[in-house]
Amino acid sequence: MNAFVFPGQGAQFVGMGKDLYDNVPEAKEMFEKANQILGFSITDIMFAGTAEELKQTKVTQPAIFLHSVILSKALGDQFNPQMVAGHSLGEFSALVAAGALSFEDGLTLVSKRAMAMQKACEMNPSTMAAIIALPDNVVEEVCASIPGVVVPANYNCPGQLVISGSNEAIDAACAKLTEAGAKRALKLNVGGAFHSPLMEPARVELEAAIQAAPFKAPICPVYQNVDAKPHTDPAEIKTNLIAQLTAPVRWTQIVQNMIADGATSFTELGPGTVLQGLIKKVDRAAVAGQRGVVGQRQGRIDRHRGRGPDAAAVAGGSIIADAAGVQCQRGNVVKS
């Protein structure tokens, strides 16, 4: 069975999506429509802006979403999912690609999500940390023992779990987890405590927008972050999407469940190769890769591999920190 997966932030690079824009007419139309919906030219920043401009929350989240969704549309008949999933922000991309939500409504929600998260970050000084080489249950127990807010946020793959919370609680947890045997406890340069109770203001703000958006049954099951289970019922999808901002991303469990349900190949749609690395760490036998697009007129190929320093580090196995969650692999910290 074909599984398509969609990344969150972290592997964005200046120039992403430019080949699609230049060579696939439908892609160009969708990018131009996005400029109108967002009220600014996101294509100018994606194609020729600076890395700093691309890192702005209001830009990064829509940019990753656009790259993934437009790539799925440009694939045409090659996009033939029997199951889909997305990491954090990528869940919105997965839902739109699978037909549960329109492109326009999906982009609007992603933009509102980015703004709501930024405001929540400004309300509560907070951060995240990657914990390497400790069993999940040990990390969970230590977090539960720390006063204040600190919780597991991203179950990325076995032995790699990201925690999220207040600055003080994260410091205390890192110290205690190091004592418990963690190979590394790395504080990450992110804007706030994503996928934690400190995102409650953002959850409340986004809830009304999600409830008002017209969802429909997707063309295949969508494995959602909150419970790692497949869903096709629009009401269930909405409920899980609302809960996502304050709940952990259960990526390890999603991959395990997809494989148990018959996934034989995973195709990552979006910049970078982060999810490919995580999938292979969950199951070394898993077949994971990316899909290229042949331009309809000029025959050029856009393989959509990351081209900036972040993406190069991902390929070598790094920890990518971003504004919608953190995807982990072995190695050094890459600050996006």
Image (cartoon, helix red, strand yellow):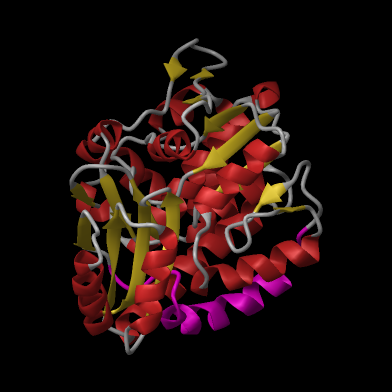
In the rendered structure, the answer to whether residue 261 lies left or right of residue 42 reads: right
What residue do we see at 31% from left, 81% from top? 122
Percent across and percent down for residue 84 are 64, 42
**Magenta residue span:** 191-215
- Predominant SS along the magenta part: helix
Q: Which of 173 and 304 is in front in this view?
A: 173
What residue do we see at 59% from left, 43% from top? 256
Where does the N terminus fall, quadrant-wise?
top right
Mark yes or no: residue 59 visible. no
Percent across and percent down for residue 183 are 21, 54
Instruction: Identify whether 286 is placed above or below 36.
Output: above
Residue 208 shown in magenta: yes
Percent across and percent down for residue 276 are 44, 34
Q: Nearer the viewer, residue 213 or 22?
A: 213
Question: Which image quadrant is residue 167 in?
Answer: bottom left
Percent across and percent down for residue 152 are 42, 68
Considering every residue shown, the one lying at the far bottom of the view is 147
What residue do we see at 45% from left, 13% from top? 300
Mark yes or no: residue 109 visible. yes
Considering every residue shown, the one lying at the far front of the view is 180
Q: Which of 276 and 281 is in front in this view?
A: 281
Instruction: Identify whether 143 is placed above or below 64.
Output: below
Residue 200 shown in magenta: yes
